[in-house]
Amino acid sequence: MHSTFQPRPVLAPVSTILMPSERLRVDAAGEGLYTALHRDTIDDVIRDVKEQRASAVLVSVTRCGPRDATRVATLVREFPRVPTVALLTELEPNAPTAVLTLGRSGVQTLVDVRQPAGWRVLRDVLLADQSRDVSRLALAQLSTDLAGAHPDCWRFFEALFGLPGGIGTIRSLSRYLGVIPSTLMSRFFRAQLPAPKRYLATARLVRAAQLFENPGLSVANVANRLDYSSPQSFGRHIRGLIHMTAVEFRQRYDGEGMLQRFRADLVLPYLTTLRWFTPLSMPLVRESSRLT
């Protein structure tokens, strides 16, 4: 029986707009948990979200004033899956006005770190968002679906969703799992399961669907984030797999919706087989003996 998946600690990048005096304190508070990318403008932060894969944004109440309100509002509106957190370190005369301005811009979380306990709250807020990542949700759901499955089978699904950067090709997946690609494909075929390439391709679309929940990410941005060679290649991938354009896919599926399609198409109809399936190290039961 496989063990319940426990996510490894990942140093998530957090893009910040902070006063110089706040940067060292934020760095110290996040040691081992996140990496702060300190920026000077909201436009730099938006660029981080698009290009550097920032998982959260931290803005200082003191640093972001009325002039930044419009760009902060754009950030919150276009990237709703990326939490924007306001940080209060000093109660300066303009702080109440700044807090209200950030609130009107759509920022819903304020962390007051004037007391030591506030830094623990900040860490909890930033880490809590990671737990909502669709890959973690997928592994939690699959752990239930595949209860009792052989560790070989679980390791295959863990590779699809458990690696921080994901895997893009069947060759890379096979190398990670320590099995020859042709052997892996043959074992799925003999077990009358969908091809491993289909599992991998659909898992990538689960990630794509969650990324598309951010209106500020274009098709090109998502294709780049998932290491497709081009937006056109990404579009062909979607059409070939689920017979939709990228725009139609974006309109129809969010991350959790695509995860449910992954389960409905590739897991739930094959549970009996998957629970005995050993694709990596153990010989398969011959079809003749299973069917007699």
Image (tube, rainbow, N blue to C red):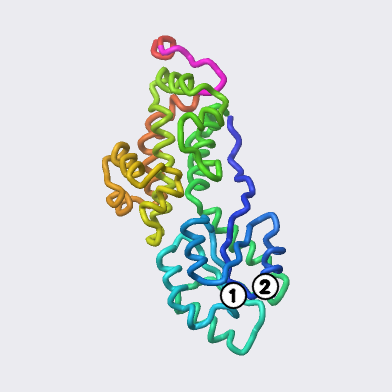
- For label 1, the residue is 60
Task: Determine the main secondary structure of the stretch shown in magenta.
Answer: loop
Q: Position of residue 177 (x, y in %)?
A: 56, 29
**Magenta span:** 279-287
Helix, strand or loop for disc 1: strand
Separation of residues labelled 2 and 1 (CA atoms): 8 Å
Q: Is residue 198 left or right of residue 150?
A: left
Mark 1: which amino acid?
Ser
Residue 151, above or below 210? above
Q: Secondary structure at mark 2?
A: helix
Quadrant including the C terminus: top left
Residue drawn at (39%, 54%) of the image: 212
| Image quadrant occupied by the N terminus | top right
> Is residue 221 visible to the viewer in this orientation of the structure?
yes
Mark 2 = which residue? Answer: 22
Instruction: Determine if residue 278 is in view.
Output: no
Give whichever of 177, 253 is nearer the camera.
177
Whether residue 117 sits left or right of residue 244 in the image: it is right
Q: Earlier in the sequence, mark 2 or mark 1?
A: 2
Residue placed at 53% from the left, 81% from the top? 65
Q: Could you tell me the amino acid type at mark 2?
A: Glu
Q: Are marks 2 and 1 in contact (CB under 8 Å)?
A: yes
Q: Percent position (x, y) of residue 279?
A: 51, 23
Closer to the camera in the image, 276 or 202: 202
- Left/right placement of residue 267 relative to residue 276 reads left
Whether the magenta-drawn stretch holds residue 286 is answered as yes
Q: Position of residue 9 (x, y in %)?
A: 64, 49
204 over 81 or under it: above or below: above
